[in-house]
Image (tube, grey):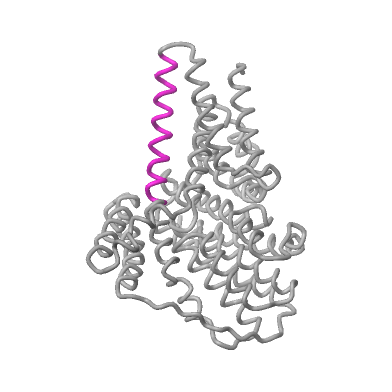
Amino acid sequence: MSLLDILLIGLAVLALAGVIFEEVTHVNKAKVTLFFGTLSWILMFLFSAGEAETETIAAGLSESVAEIASLWLFLVAAMTFVAYLNKKGLIENVVYLIMPARVSERRLLFLTGLFCFIFSSLADNITATLVSCSLILTLNLELKKRIQFITLVVFAVNSGGVALITGDVTTLMIFLAGKVEILTLLTLALPASITVFLLAVFLSRGLDGTVVLEPRMNSVRPVDAVISVLFLGTIIGTITGNSLFGIPPVLTFLFGLSVMFLVSRFMSDDNDLDPILEYVRSIEFETLLFFLGILLLVGSLKEIHALDSLVAVYELMPPLAANYLMGAFSAIIDNVPLTAALLKAGIEMSPAEWMGLTYAVGVGGSLLVIGSAAGIVAMSKIPGLTFSSYLRYLGHLFAAYTLGYAGVYLLGNVLN
């Protein structure tokens, strides 16, 4: 191993530490990963052994940038739709439409889990978590019950995201790598939803009160309703187009975004006050920059063959056990770099085993409150939610995760 290889691995470790200890350093993880990711590639070019090696590095960079561009463009389109619907209050309207005005705490827990599961598969887990946090804060629950609710929220939004490429970036990454088919992913919704229900049963203990909800319905313009239908139509069109004609999802979503722009132009009368392109600027670019930095880092590690150790894990134990372990690791190590590293490592698995990994890295982060974006967002919004208060339900979460993983394994064997 050369000095440059050691340096690049060291930079990757520093970047990972920056992500883990973001709350301590107060330096945004997007800034840290983007800095180390770009620096790694620059160092490889600077210390290239010759023209041939430079060409190899350039080819590797081009491959990484092409993968990142496809991921970025898909996420930009999907996040713009969600930003629009959230700003117009349509998501909040849906919440209050499905929630009864007066409901028992136990029933509300199940309804909240159902909403989080469905919505996070269509949109993203951060938005689903924010909406759910707002609902929970209006209930004035005692601290213990509030933690029970938010524990289910974190697990449900992560579980919902694994079944659709719009719901979780790791699912999208595994799909774009050609490891699973889009219709096969949909079947993950069955075991994932069952485990959300089981966790709700575990957590419903002690919830014997009644709460009253005060609906806060927002006015809906015709253009908003049309764009809502267009969003659902784009998701259905993406699944159908890819499964029947092999149309890349990024192309379908960009087409849907273009239709959204045209609908807004011809149906809205306030273009100057509320230009549709403003919603592109309001999406979470910090999240996108984080993905960019991480994928550049992992790409540089692939170039120096530093990911071979991950392959060794799969040589020491069967994929069934290794995937389960990777899911548990994703509660400590961010699932995006972990998934990217596994994909870049060239691991050979069957479609059923890739399904297991998709579930594991998507849901495993729920085991710890710091293990997923949903947990981090919840900690920032819910008073009293701490690492230790969430840890109280680790046994329940591990049981649900294990049952879900077992269900995915059985389902994969049936399908394949």
Q: Nearer the viewer, residue 326 or 382?
A: 382
Q: Going 59% across and 88% down the picture, which residue do you hit?
A: 102
Highlighted range, magenta: 52-75
Please give the name of the residue rendered at 37% of the width and 47% of the height, measured from the top-left corner.
73
Q: Residue at x 67, y 53 (%)?
A: 370
Q: Residue furthest top?
A: 50
Location of residue 382 by image quarter: bottom right
Left or right for 179, reference 33 = left
Q: Position of residue 305 (x, y in %)?
A: 55, 26
Total of numbered circles in the picture?
0
* Rendering coords of residue 364 (x, y %): 62, 54
By secondary structure, the bulk of the magenta-drawn segment is best described as helix
The residue sitting at the left extreme is 266
Residue at image location 52% in from the left, 72% down from the top: 115
Q: Point out residue 16 in the picture as x, y percentages from the top left corner.
A: 63, 38
The magenta stretch spans residue 54:
yes
